[in-house]
Image (tube, rainbow, N blue to C red):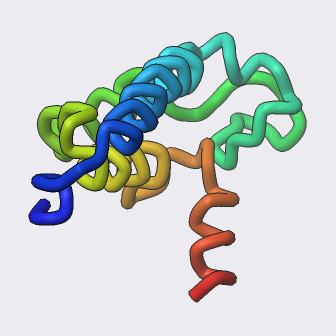
Amino acid sequence: AEEDANASAEAVAKAAQINTLIEQWMALASDQTTYDNVDVVARTRRKAGQPGLTVNAAALLKRVQQELGPRPPPELPTALALWGGALINPLPALGVAYWRRMEQRISL
């Protein structure tokens, strides 16, 4: 993105922090045992309020990553932010961060 060409050192440093959070989210979101905790919101549960999913979370996440392409580096903070947003809120939805879509609809 054009605005990334003039990214400040502060923006690049914050983008590097986002990278760490993306890694943590990906590890949790792709681990089936994450969804054994019924407090983790997931619309793809076998049965509401019960552990387990009807889908393979790791396979879904891998497909989304393939569709998005390579993750932009922190030196391109805007591109990285958009990539990260698309990762946690893809279409079709993974069913694990649906509140993001709801918040976006409300704010529009």
Left/right placement of residue 8 relative to residue 31 reads: left
Tell which of 7 and 82 is nearer to you.
7
Residue 108 drawn above or below residue 86:
below
Find residue 58 and report its image quarter: top left
Residue toward you, 68 or 38 = 68
Location of the C terminus (image quadrant): bottom right
Pinpoint residue 102: horizontal percent, then vertical percent. Answer: 66, 70
Q: Quadrant of residue 96?
A: top right
In this orientation, does residue 5 appear? yes
- Residue 11 falls left or right of residue 103: left
Residue reaching furthest to the bottom = 108
Q: Is residue 56 visible?
A: no
The image shows residue 103 at horizontal and vertical percentages of 67, 70
Establish if 97 lies above or below 26: below
> x, y (%) of residue 11?
37, 44
Residue at x 61%, y 59% (from the top left corner)? 100
Residue farthest toward the front in the current orientation of the protein: 9
Occupied quadrant, residue 92: bottom left
Looking at the figure, which quarter contains the N terminus?
Answer: bottom left
